[in-house]
Image (cartoon, rainbow, N blue to C red):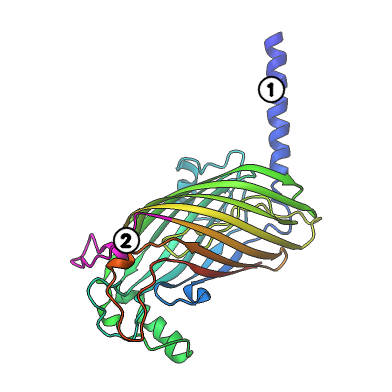
Amino acid sequence: MRFFISFVMIFWVVFFYGNAFADDFNLDSPRNKGFWRFEIDNDAFLGEDSNFSNGWSIQYHTKRYSTWEESEAFGWVKWIGQHFPTLGDEGSIVRYGQGIGQNLITPEDITNPNPPPGDLPYAATLTYTLNWQRFNPETASNFQVSIGVLGEEALGEEVQKFVHDDLGAGDTPEGWDTQRDSEPVLNIGYQHLWRLLHFGEYHNAWSAQLMIAPSLNLGNIITGADFGIGFRFGWNIQEGFNTYPAPPGRGFFQSSLLAKPASASPHAMEFVLAGRASALAYAVFYDGSIITNDDREVEREDFIFGGYLSINYHHYDMLSIRLSLLLQTDLLDEDALPPPQPNQEKTSTDNSFGTIMIDFHF
């Protein structure tokens, strides 16, 4: 009898707490929408134009679902979501995202048609990314796969010449004939996030939270590991985890945020302060290719540290705007870079950049 009473009590707690927890996800809210995201990552925001020169992406993220089975995804996408470790939907909500994007890497002196040995070679990637997102207020998981091409097929020369020549944004780049050799690229990434602390109320009030975010990348674009810690605070912010800049194939396309209820104000202001430590095992932009005969290597550091600041405005019925700065320690060895030509500077040794993200909800 005692066992039966205990079983009933446990069942009652699990059933009713689980349903109350599910209700908190606001899946029936009119603000549970999909959205398009336009992201531009560029070092020109910091007065630079070399090393990581520019990245852009166009992303689509679905609305939130209670299970992978009810999502409007292809069968194989649902299967991966249901079977990949930590992406299961028990006690969480799910969504998937996809996008295309491009990265450009250039030396500082783009007027020189023949960059000297030891300087950073021109390079561009063009990728398609698909990711799976599983999250609740306490944790989130993100698994993604990026495929594409490195080399002239990535259209880096055409894009930079259009921006610099047709739009008048800088000198004509002369060295794209020396860019890295063409090869297919494949990168796989996994990220797991934990909320450590939170304060205040998320709806129509001030709140804050502290989180950590380890991640791993494996592939012939970049192989390495990151550990991030972030603090976000603001008024009427969404419950969940903040969105970081995501250069295609290197960062994570994601939006692990719960929908706002209809009773909440459509307006929100959010601030994010974060730090990140990175261990870099391989990067084709700096280490040469493991597929082709392009073995041009640039002396670099194995560990990089960065700080991140973001100011975000959300109108939950229309759009979100994020303005961010990512400042990093030196990636390249300045002493190993060749001396610049007269009236020129050395290639930038860090990958600091600014970002503009705009989400359009529909």
Q: In the rendered image of this protein, does residue 19 appear above or below residue 350?
A: above
Residue at position x 53%, y 51% in the image: 133
Is 218 placed above or below 113 here?
A: above
**Residue sitting at x 45%, y 91%:** 166
Residue 210's spot in the image, x, y percent?
62, 47
Question: Quick check: is 19 in the magenta stretch?
Answer: no
Quarter that holds the C terminus = bottom right
Which residue is painted at 45% across and 47% down in the image?
Answer: 80
Residue 46 image offset from top left, x and y in percent: 51, 74
Contact, mark 2 vs mark 1 (Cβ under 8 Å): no
Question: Looking at the magenta stretch, what is its main secondary structure?
Answer: loop
Going from N to C along the chain, the mark reached first, 2 or 1, is 1
Considering every residue shown, the one lying at the far top of the view is 1
What is the spatial separation of the Cα atoms under label 2 and label 1, in whole angstroms?
Answer: 56 Å
Q: Which residue is mark 2?
A: 300
Left or right placement of residue 341 versus residue 28 in this view: left
- Residue 53 appears in the rendering: yes
Q: Residue 209, position in %: x, y?
A: 66, 48
Residue at 49% over, 58% down: 306
Give SS at disc 2. loop
* Residue topped by disc 1: 10
Q: Report the magenta residues as a range.
A: 286-304
